[in-house]
Image (cartoon, grey):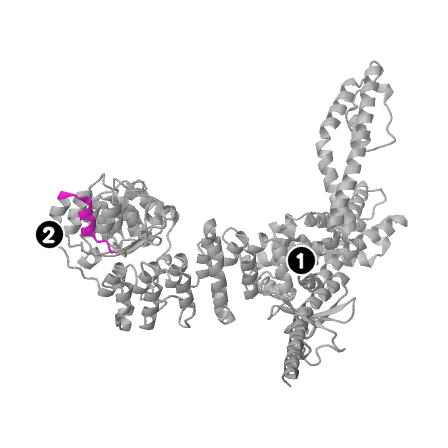
Amino acid sequence: MKSESSEDPERLLKVPQCSFLEAERLLFAVQTNDHQRIHDLVVKNPDVLTHQYAPYDYQTILHIACNDQHSMGEVTRNTIDTLIKFGARCDQPNKNDHWEPIHYTAINANKEKMEAILSHLSKDQINSLVTCTKHTFQKYTFCSKKIEKTYSNNALTILLKYGNREKDFHACCQLLIDKGINVQQADSKGVTPSDLIWKLHDDKLNRLLKVRSAFQDNFKDSFGLLRLNSINRFISMDLSPDEANSLDGKDENVSSCTLLQMCCAKGMTACVKHLLEKGASPNKVTTKNPEHPIVIAINGDHEEMVKVFLSRHDVVLPDDILLQLQMLYKNKKKVSTADKYMKMILKNLRRYDKETLQKYLRARDDLERTALHYAVHYKCTDTTLTLLSMGASLISEDIFGYTPLSSIDAHVLEKCFTNCISAIQEDETPTGFFQKKAQYSVKIDYGNLISKEKDVQESQFLYQMIGVPGLNHLMNHPVVASYLVLKWEKFKWWVYLNLSLYFVAYVSLLFDGLFKTSHFLQTSNVLLWIAYAVLLCRDLSQLLIFRLSYLKKAESIIDLSLIGAVTYIVIDSWISTTTVNKNLLVARSVVFLTSTIGIFNQLGNVSYFTIKVAMLRQISANFAKAMAFYIFPVVAFFFCFHVLSEKEHAFFDLLYDTVTMFAGDADGEFPEEQFEHNPIFGKTIYIIFVVSMGIILHNLLIGLAVSDLQEIRKQAEFLCKKEHAKYVVKVEQIIFNQFKNSKLLKPLFRNILAYLYVFKKSRALVIHFDDSKSMHVKEDSRAKKKKIHCRETVKYLQDIFKQLTLNDKRTEDAYSIKSLHEKFEKLEALVLESLEKSKKL
C-alpha cells in the first residue's frame, strides 16, 4: 500500500548491488582524482556508481564527491565531469536528505564543483526545490544550531541561509544568478533569496541583483497565500482538483512538497479540510518528500488534523506508520504524544482486513525490526498487547537475530498468552466433535508464536523461551503446555527407542557376566544383535547426513564408543581362543559405562525421572567446577609428599593416594615408611592435609546440596516441560538446518518436518475438558484428538475459562453489581412515579 506518487519514493533503496571492495576502491580513486582508476572500475561494474555508502548517510559517489565532507575537499571539476560522463546522475536525490548534488555544492560554497554540476543541468533543474531540516545541517560545523524545517528551498536559498562563508560564497551566488536561478523563489516561510540578500546588507550581492534580471515570482497564488499564512483568503479560493494537488515546482522531479504537505507542516487544519473537500489526495507525496501528510501532522502534534485524515475512508496509511510512531518514543518529552497517536492509529487499523493489517505489522526498517520490536524495547505495555492482539509476530528476527520474545517482560507475555485463550460457546462446537457431551471448551490461538509460512521451524518460540531464564516459568502456562504435549507425542518414541537400545546392551552384558560365559555367542542374546544393528544403522545414517555437526554432540561420542565396544565384542566372539583377552574385558566395561550414561541421559526426558536426572546433572557439573578450583591445594600437598618421600618410583602411587584421599577415601593411611627421616614434618603436613580435606569436602558437599536443591526446587514446577522443550528444539533445529542447507535430501527433511509439525493449516488448538483431571486437544482443522492428563494445565485452563465466563457480557448483565444497580434505579423511578400519581389523585 504505497502512497500516491508518479515515482516510487523508495526507488532509491532498490539499487543494483556491487561488492564492498569495489565501492571502497572507487571512493579512494575519487578522493585522489585518479581518472584512469575510475574508468577501470566503472567499466568493470557500472553499478558501482549507484552504490549507497552506509557510513556516509547512504549517499552515492557523486553526492559524496560534491560534498566537501569525508575528505572530498580536493576533488576537482574534471573528476565530477568524469563521474557524470560514465553515468552518474546529477539530478537524482539521495536517500536520506533527498538533496541533489547541486545543493551540496551550494552549502559547501565550492565554485569549481558547482560549475561542473551546472554545466549538466537545465534551467528547471537548476531551480530544483528541496526540504531543509535540522538533521541535514547538523553534519556541518559552520551551520547555525537553530534551524527550522522549511520546504521550497532552491540552491541559492540554501547558500544564503547556511552556506560556508569562508569559501567561494560570493562567487557561487554570482554563478547561480548568472545561470538563471529564481531569486524570487519563496520557501514555506515566505522568505526569498532576494529577501535574504537584502537582509545581509551586502553591496556586492545587491549589485548582482540589479545587474542581472531576476525571474518573476512564478509560484501559484495558493502557495503564496500559504507562505504568507493567509488562511481566510486561501479558504475562499475555488480550487479545481488539479490545483488542490499542485506542487511547489514545475514538475515532481524538481518539487519539494505538495500543497497539502505544506499545509500539514504549517499546522493549518482549516486549509487541510478545504483542500480535501476540493479533491486533494490525502495520500499524495513527492519523490523528494515521501513523508505522508498524516505523518507530517503527527510529527507536528496537530491532533485535529490527524482526526480529519483518519475520518476519511480514502486515506491509505503508509506501511511503516507504526515504525514512524515508535521513533517518537526516542524523545522522552514526546512519550505522551506518541501514546496518544499510537492509540488513534491502532484503532483506525482495526477496520482493515487481516491480510492488509499484516502488512502494517510486518513492516520493517533498515535493521529489519518491526513495530513490536520497538514497543517491547520501549516497554509500552498497552501498545505491545494491542499489537499482539492484532496478530503481530513475537518471533520475527532483526538482522542481529533478536526477536521481541527474547526481550519481552514476563508479565506482559503472560497477559498475551492469556489473551490467546477464548471460550467457545456451545453452538460453535461442531456436531460430533467429541463423543461425549462437552462440559466446556476453549480455543487457543498461536498466531503470535508460530509463523504461517511454509517450511519454518515450528518450535522457534520454545527456543527463545528456554534462552531467557525469566520466561522459563511460563512453560507451565496452558498455551505452552498444551502445545508441548502435542509436540512431545511426535518425539517421545525416539526417546523410548534410544532408551531401549541402551537398556538391551546393558542387560545383555549383565546376564553374560552373571552366567560367566566365555564367548559372546554363548549368551544367545538375539535382542543385543538387533539392538546393535539398529544402533549401527541409526548412527551411520546420522553421520552421513549430518557429518561434522553429528560429531559435535556429546551423545554422539557416547554412541560411537558404545558401537565400537560392542563391535569389538562381536568380532572377538567369532575368534575361538582359549586365552583370556584382556581387551575384551575393557570393551565390556566400556559398554557398561556408555550404556549407563545413555540410559541416564534418556531418562532425563521421561517425566517421572526428569527432576532426579536434572539434580544429578546439576550437582555433578557444580562439583566438577569446584574440584577444578581446588586442584591447586591438591597439587601443593602432592608435591610436598613427593619431595619428602624417600621411596623411589613412588610418583604415581603418591598421586593416586593424594587424589583419592582428597576425594573422600576413608581408608587412606599415613605412609610412615616413606617419611622415616622427616617424621614430624611429614606428619604435620599429613594432618594439615586431612583437616583441609575435611573442611573442603564438608563445605563443598553441604553447599552443593543446599544451593543446588533450592535452585532445582524453584524449577520443579516447570523443569519437566523445560527438558522436553530443550529436546524438541534441539532435534527440530538440527533437522531444519539440514533442510535449509541440503539439496539432494531436501524432500526427505521436508517430510520429516511435516511429520513433526503440530499445525498443518490453522494456528489454533481446541481444548475440551472431560473432567478435573484430563482434557482433549485437537488442531482446529483436523478431527484427530489427543488426551492430556496434566492436572496443572487443566486447572490453569479451568481458572482462565471461569474468568472468561465472568467477563462475558451476558453473564455480567444478569449477575454483575452494575446490572443490579441499574435495576434498583429503575425500581426507584417507578416507585417515585407511583407516589407522584397518588399525590395528584
Which residues lie in the magenta part?
190-203
- Magenta region includes residue 194: yes
Give the residue number, with chain letter if any, for mark 2: 212
Q: Is residue 120 left or right of residue 802?
A: left
Q: Is residue 519 left or right of residue 230?
A: right
Question: In the rendered image, which quarter is residue 168 located in?
Answer: top left
State the residue at coordinates (22%, 46%): 113
The amino acid type of the residue labelled 1 equals Val
Q: Nearer the viewer, residue 206 or 604?
A: 206
Q: Nearer the viewer, residue 746 or 701?
A: 701
Q: Magenta: predominant secondary structure element?
A: helix
Q: Where in the figure is residue 795, as x and y percent of width and height? A: 75, 63
Q: Which secondary structure, mark 1?
A: helix
Q: Residues within 10 Å of mark 2 (few under 14, many from 20)?
A: few
The amino acid type of the residue labelled 2 equals Arg
Give the residue number, with chain letter if any, for mark 1: 728
Q: Where in the figure is residue 227, as x and y percent of width and height? A: 26, 59
For the view shown, which residue lies furthest in the top direction?
Answer: 677
For the view shown, which residue lies furthest in the bottom direction?
Answer: 841
- Magenta region includes residue 666: no
Kindly identify which numbered label has been placed on residue 615: none
